[in-house]
Amino acid sequence: MLKYISMDVHIKKMAFHDKVFKPYDIRGTYPEELDHNTIELIAEGFAEFLKSGGGKNCVVGEDIRSTSPEIAEMIIEKLLARGVDVIYIGQATTPMHLFSIAQSKADGGIMVTASHNPARFNGLKIYKGIKAESEKTGLFKIKEIIKSGFPEYGGPRGKLSRADFLNDYVEFLTKDFSPGARINAVFDAGGGAVGLVLSKILPLLKNVDASTLYMDPDPSLLVCEPNPLMPEAQKKIRETILEKKADIGFLFDPDGDRVIVLDEKGDVVRGDGILWLLSKKLVRPGEGVVYDYCRSSRALVEDLEADSIRCFKSRVGHSFIKEEMRIEDAILGGEISGHYYFKDFFFSDSALFAAMKLLQLKASSKEPLSEMTRPYFRYFHSGEINFEVKNKDEMKSFFEEKFKDGERDYFDGVTFKYPNWWFNIRPSGTEDLLRLVLEAKSKTIFDAKKEEVMSFLFSKGAKLA
């Protein structure tokens, strides 16, 4: 019998798919890459990781995708079997899950979500206390625990409790909300979990005339494109903004940690521009802002440092931004992709927290949103362009040879710098893509250099994603 158990454990370890461990979360196709065996091993590894630091309980939540409840059930069972108490909150946004950890003073948490990825994907966001774990911290340790093997557990089984923090979360988001002038806004929940929270918030917002889209949870993620950065995801909210003559629009991703902001013209306001606006209005001289270095316009640091605001660069990814914010005690953080992080929200990101702040800023200004942000967008910036490549990790050497006359750094991917322009290439941490960002000080230089870099990519077999 003992020999059989030992062999079974060995087989489980051999079948473990460690490729689902990404730089800042766990993600893969389900149930192929993120299979049942791998999920169970991760849950057991997390239990041992938590207990090794004295942890005894954790919060488990799930997004709205159809496969999340069964994954949460597997995780809960393995945690209980290893003596970890579980507080189960059911469907939630990722920020609400974090809020639940803080409210319950839990030792950690697992959120079942693959964010904006299509429905065939799922994943896990891991927390120790209220701190998200990355490849440099807990994710690496959990993977090592699994590969090293963990002892059989013969102690008491953990206890399962259920809790609902929705009303507390709504109260937290709206407690300081007091816009002055009346504002017309469109909210597109994208069929995700944010609709569960937003439906409770909107009736409490005085002076906000709200139009809503896709508020009902869509477990299939087929009602609309789940990635809010994709043009097809933005079509309906753009039409509604123009039809309703709205002042601002908010487009959320399925797990509610990311928001794309659109102005009164229906145009997307790039994420670093929103961070610039929030920083100019909410951050005082001497305080700090963390930004994603490889994608943000150089105008961000120029303008904020001119106001004596301290700027700290970070790699792309929520756990890296949060870690840098804690180290520097920064007030704000942001990414071009629509994640906004606040010291007042546990150094973490909440799309609805950001939306509340932006509603107040817009209501306090007589200028249209496009005019409020116009001074920032003085350089010519490509945004993030994604390419499908078969050899994304080899591309670096090709570019180093082609652009060897440029200054370069390797803070995140590779950034090539020239006097009047720069560009960055970076392999995606969660998808089989190579990402390009390019910026220049004039349109002539921008057009020429964008054509040069993209043509080089195409010559190496890359295709636009």
Image (spheres, rainbow, N blue to C red):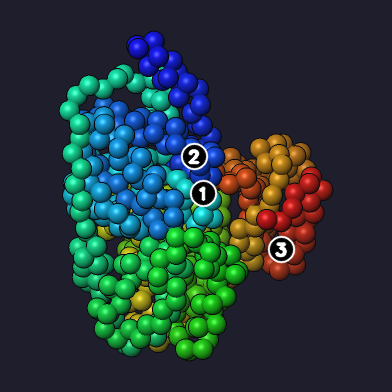
Badge 3 element: helix
Residue 425 percent location from the top left of the image? 64, 48
Q: Which residue is mark 2?
A: 34
Q: CA distance from mark 2 to mark 1?
A: 8 Å
Give the residue displayed 32% in from the left and 50% down from the top. 61
Residue 11 position, x and y percent, is 47, 21
The N terminus - image quarter? top left
Q: Nearer the viewer, residue 144 or 338?
A: 144
- How far is disc 2 from disc 3 in space, using C-alphas? 41 Å
Query: Comparing marks 2 and 3, which lies closer to the viewer?
Result: 2
Report whether 237 appears left or right of 144. right
Mark 3 surroundings within 10 Å by alpha-carbon count, few (fewer than 14), some (14 through 19), many (20 or more): many
Judge from the rendering whether residue 35 lies leftward or rightward of residue 88; answer left or right: right
Q: Amino acid at mark 1?
A: Phe
Q: Amino acid at mark 2?
A: Leu
Q: Are marks 2 and 1 in contact (CB under 8 Å)?
A: yes
Q: Which residue is mark 3?
A: 446
In primary-sequence order, the first of circles 2 and 3 is 2
Relative height, residue 327 to residue 453 (above, below): above
Question: Which residue is tagged 1?
Answer: 121
Vertical side of 243 occupied by 343: above or below: above
Report helix, strand or loop for mark 1: strand
- How far apart are the two marked residues, 1 and 3, measured between alpha carbons? 36 Å
